[in-house]
């Protein structure tokens, strides 16, 4: 979640942002069958939410893919091969 710099309603964006991060807002997820792990540590985690220790993550190779040169090369390739496709 982010607030876009230069957006048309920065004050309202901040109000919404602060609300979305509140315990009250994050506790609403379970009432809508949305069982994500809340980002606010004080919000209740629904029992149906995934246990983070059980989530399998990729073994990201920062030494190979973490350099700015590699990132730039991959993003340019993405733009050329995928991002330019008709929508």
Image (cartoon, grey):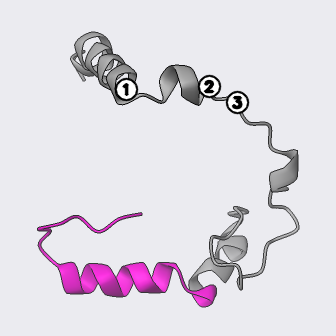
**Could you say which is closer to the camera, residue 42 or residue 47?**
42
Secondary structure state at the residue bearing disc 3 = loop
For the residues bearing labels 2 and 1, Cβ distance under 8 angstroms = no
Q: Position of residue 11 (x, y in %)?
A: 22, 86
Residue 68 on the magenta span: no
Q: CA distance from mark 2 to mark 3?
A: 9 Å
Q: What residue is disc 2 on?
A: 61
Secondary structure state at the residue bearing disc 2 = loop
* Quadrant (top left, top right, bottom left, bottom right) of the C terminus: top left
The magenta stretch spans which residues? Answer: 1-24
Q: Position of residue 69 (x, y in %)?
A: 33, 22
80 horizontally vs 32: left or right: left
Of discs 1 and 3, which sits in the foreground?
Answer: 1
Q: CA distance from mark 1 to mark 3?
A: 17 Å
Quadrant of the image occupied by residue 31 = bottom right
Quadrant of the image occupied by residue 22 = bottom right
* Neighbours of disc 1 within 10 Å: few (<14), some (14-19), many (20+): few
* Quadrant (top left, top right, bottom left, bottom right) of the N terminus: bottom left
Q: What residue is disc 1 on?
A: 71
Q: What residue is disc 3 on?
A: 58
């Amino acid at each position: 979640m982010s607030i876009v710099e230069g957006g048309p309603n920065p004050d309202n964006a901040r109000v919404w942002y602060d609300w979305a991060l509140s315990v009250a807002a994050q506790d609403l997820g379970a009432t809508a069958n949305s069982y994500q792990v809340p980002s606010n540590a004080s919000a209740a985690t629904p029992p149906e939410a995934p246990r983070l220790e059980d989530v399998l993550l990729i073994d990201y190779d920062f030494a190979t893919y973490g350099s700015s040169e590699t990132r730039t090369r991959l993003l340019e390739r993405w733009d050329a091969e995928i991002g330019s496709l008709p929508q």
